[in-house]
Image (cartoon, rainbow, N blue to C red):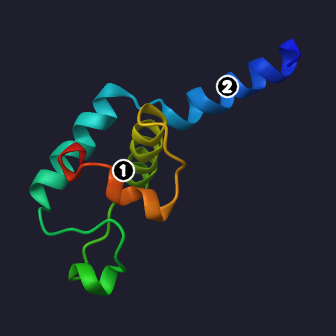
């Protein structure tokens, strides 16, 4: 693999899995304050509760990070492999 492809691949992985620590704490607190919220359900199934967009992006980064750590592809089927305690 040439150097440019390696750098591009690293940049893709870093951007997909990096979460600002403050934003990660905010996401955790949001989940604690909304314990019944299901991030994979439609808003009508969450009693109208909607996750703010910036937290939704952080959540997706968290999913990607956990998928990378566990060598899983980021697919819906593999979400069952990720422990709920990380959310």
Q: How many marks?
A: 2
- Location of residue 64 in the rendering, given as x and y in whole percent from the top left corner: 48, 43
Give neighbour class at mark 2: few <14, some 14-19, many 20+ (Cα, 10 Å).
few
Per the image, label 1 sits on a secondary structure element best described as helix
Q: Please report the residue visible at 39 percent of the width from the left and 57 percent of the height from the top.
A: 79
Tell me: residue 72, above or below residue 10.
below
Residue 43's quadrant in the figure? Answer: bottom left
Tell me: residue 2, above or below residue 66.
above
Dot in front, 1 or 2: 2
Residue 50's quadrant in the figure? Answer: bottom left
Residue sitting at the far top? 3
Q: Please report the residue visible at 83 percent of the width from the left and 23 percent of the height from the top.
A: 5
- Location of residue 65 in the rendering, given as x and y in whole percent from the top left corner: 44, 36
Classify residue 54 as left or right of residue 44. right
Q: Please report the residue visible at 67 percent of the width from the left and 22 percent of the height from the top.
A: 10
Give neighbour class at mark 1: few <14, some 14-19, many 20+ (Cα, 10 Å).
some
Spatial distance from mark 1 to mark 2, Cα to Cα? 22 Å
- The quarter in which the N terminus is drawn is top right
The reply to whether residue 52 is in sight is no
Tell me: residue 25, above or below residue 44.
above
Classify residue 44 as left or right of residue 9. left
Residue 55: image tag = 1
- Location of residue 87 in the rendering, given as x and y in whole percent from the top left corner: 24, 49
Relative depth, front residue between 18 and 83: 83
- Location of residue 37 in the rendering, given as x and y in whole percent from the top left corner: 21, 68
Relative depth, front residue between 80 and 40: 80
Determine which residue is flagged by label 2: 11
Residue 64: image tag = none
Which callout, 1 or 2, points at the residue further toward the start of the chain?
2
Per the image, label 2 sits on a secondary structure element best described as helix
């Amino acid at each position: 693999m040439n150097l440019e492809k390696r750098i591009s691949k690293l940049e893709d992985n870093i951007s997909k899995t990096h979460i600002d620590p403050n934003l990660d704490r905010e996401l955790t607190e949001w989940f604690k304050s909304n314990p019944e919220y299901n991030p994979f359900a439609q808003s009508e199934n969450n009693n109208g509760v909607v996750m703010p967009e910036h937290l939704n992006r952080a959540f997706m980064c968290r999913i990607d990070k956990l998928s990378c750590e566990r060598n899983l592809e980021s697919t819906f089927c593999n979400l069952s492999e990720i422990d709920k305690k990380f959310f």
